[in-house]
Amino acid sequence: MTMVPNKKLKSPYSKGLQNQSKPSNSKALSTCLDQIKLAIKNQSSLGGIWEDWTELAGKPLAANCRPLKVSGGILVIGASHPQWLQALKYNRTQLLGTLRAAGHKIKDIRIQQHHPDLITRKEDTQDQENIWSRHPSRIDVHGIANCDSCGSPAPAGEMALWGRCGFCRRKELNQSSKTS
């Protein structure tokens, strides 16, 4: 036994509904994508933070530190080198404020060492070796001298660079920042 439908289904674009225009697929898709982006950002998911990471952290930190995960409102950030780990710790409060101001619902930041590539690029290794070979604190390269300010022995590279040892240079910078 075959059933015959008693009404024929009409398409919304059939002759009876000619006055209605077809929805614009490009507008609908664009609106949908904007809504997804907003939802991701509002949920403070990792994707929303990744999207804004360079603006949130700044170029130097963003290039060397990565958001790793968000769990319970706590953002875990990984640093590629101890120097950047220290920079993150120093800028932690400011970064947390920036994240909150951007609409991310982050309660706290945890910082950890993170090695994104197990194999270090050859260029990076050569750059680090080059910098270290010329570093002013190397007494095996530059020798040792006495500081003119405090009389303590200090690397000659620091003496040539600043005219005093690293400790006296720090004191000088600290005093100049307090007077500014």
Image (spheres, rainbow, N blue to C red):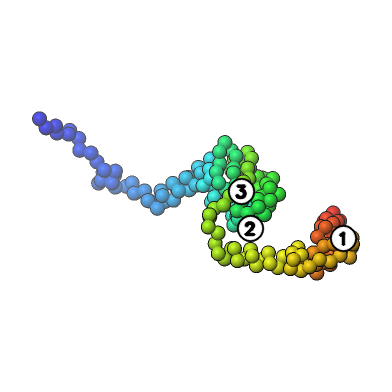
Nearest to N terminus: mark 1 or mark 3: 3
C-alpha separation, residue under disc 1 versus residue under disc 3: 35 Å
Spot occupied by residue 14 in the image (x, y as percentages of width and height) = 25, 46
Q: Helix, strand or loop at disc 1?
A: loop
The label nearer to you, 3 versus 2, is: 3
Q: Residue at x 59, y 38 (%)?
A: 73
Which of marks 1 and 2 precedes in the sequence? 2
From the image, state whether disc 1 or disc 3 is nearer to you: 1
| Residue in view at x 62 percent, y 46 percent | 112
- Which numbered disc flags the more N-terminal residue, 3 or 2? 2
Spatial CA span between label 2 and label 1:
35 Å
Which residue occupies the foreground of this view, 144 or 171?
144
Q: Quadrant of the N terminus?
A: top left
Q: Which residue is mark 1?
A: 152
Q: Residue at x 50, y 42 (%)?
A: 39
The residue to which callout 2 is attached is 60
Element type at mark 3: strand
State whether residue 180 appears in this view.
Answer: no
Packing grade of label 2 (10 A; few <14, some 14-19, many >=20) is few
The numbered mark at residue 113 is: 3
Residue 58's spot in the image, x, y percent? Answer: 63, 55
Asked whether the beta carbons under mark 3 and mark 2 sit within 8 Å of each other, the answer is no
Instruction: State the separation of the CA atoms marked 3 and 2.
Output: 16 Å
Label ID, residue 123: none
Q: Nearer the viewer, residue 97 or 25?
A: 97
